[in-house]
């Protein structure tokens, strides 16, 4: 599953570490998410879309 | 809907601490039994402690990294499954070799072999899963 996390994070001027703190997770998880190596749980996906103030479908590209 | 989930310490920290204790006990047992291998236990215990202090130092500015998150739990689960499958394969292979008299081992030696095989299998599968996810 592709996502726009890196693009949206950079748009908001957040570092990976700051973003990880907002999500209460580790920086490694953010790196994996951005590379598309790891698909988040529905809870984490919901948290991410809430941080970006977008719908899940706008952040994650379901193919 | 927001429910506070209790944070659990990262298994790397717990693992390093547990290994340090285990290898210290191993070293003490070997020392009491007056075998020459006691330094292996103490050496590995020292390495585990160094790794633990390295992890603590690395995460001192970001305490969030000291706790488990869903990806770490996922990796732990996947690597446990993988190491179990590999270990099962090793047991089947050893069983075949012993039954066909290809190797002859005492049960105590066999347990020692298994003990020293489990650690690299577990560590290797963890690294593979970490790289993959």
Image (cartoon, rainbow, N blue to C red):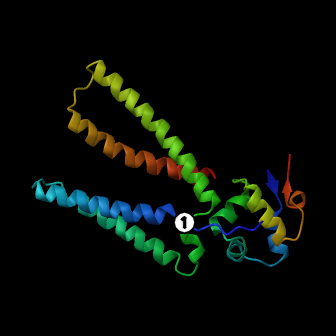
At x 52%, y 64%, the residue is B10
Determine whether B61 is above or below B26 in the image. Answer: below
Secondary structure under tag 1 reads loop
- Give the quarter of the image for residue A13: bottom right
Q: Is residue B40 left or right of residue A47?
A: left
Residue, x 37% and y 61% (percent of image)?
Answer: B18
Name the spot of residue B1 as percent of width and height, x first. Answer: 78, 65
Decide if residue B41 is in sight here: yes
Quarter assignment of residue B5: bottom right
**Residue at 47% across / 48% down in the picture?**
B124
Q: Residue at 60% across / 68% down in the picture?
A: B6
Asked if one can make out residue B40 in the rendered structure from this viewpoint, the answer is no
Q: Which residue is mark 1?
A: B8
In the displayed structure image, the side of residue A24 where residue A11 appears, left or right: right
Query: Residue B34, percent across and down?
Result: 9, 55
**Residue A45 sits above or below residue B95 on the image:** below
């Amino acid at each position: 599953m592709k996502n726009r996390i890196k693009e949206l994070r950079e748009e908001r001027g957040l570092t990976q570490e700051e973003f990880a703190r907002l999500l209460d997770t580790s920086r490694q998880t953010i790196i994996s998410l951005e590379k598309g190596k790891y698909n988040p749980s529905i809870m984490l996906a919901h948290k991410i879309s809430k941080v970006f103030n977008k719908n899940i479908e706008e952040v994650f590209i379901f193919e | 809907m927001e429910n506070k989930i209790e944070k659990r310490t990262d298994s790397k920290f717990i693992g390093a601490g547990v290994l340090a204790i285990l290898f210290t006990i191993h070293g003490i047992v070997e020392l009491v039994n007056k075998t020459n291998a006691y330094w292996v236990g103490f050496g590995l215990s020292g390495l585990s402690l160094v790794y633990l202090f390295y992890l603590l130092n690395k995460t001192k500015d970001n305490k969030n990294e000291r706790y488990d998150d869903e990806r770490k739990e996922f990796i732990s689960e996947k690597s446990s499954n993988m190491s179990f499958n590999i270990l099962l394969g090793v047991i089947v292979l050893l069983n075949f070799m012993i039954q066909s008299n290809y190797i002859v081992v005492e049960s105590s030696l066999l347990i020692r072999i298994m003990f020293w095989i489990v650690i690299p299998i577990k560590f290797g599968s963890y690294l593979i899963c970490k790289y993959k996810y």
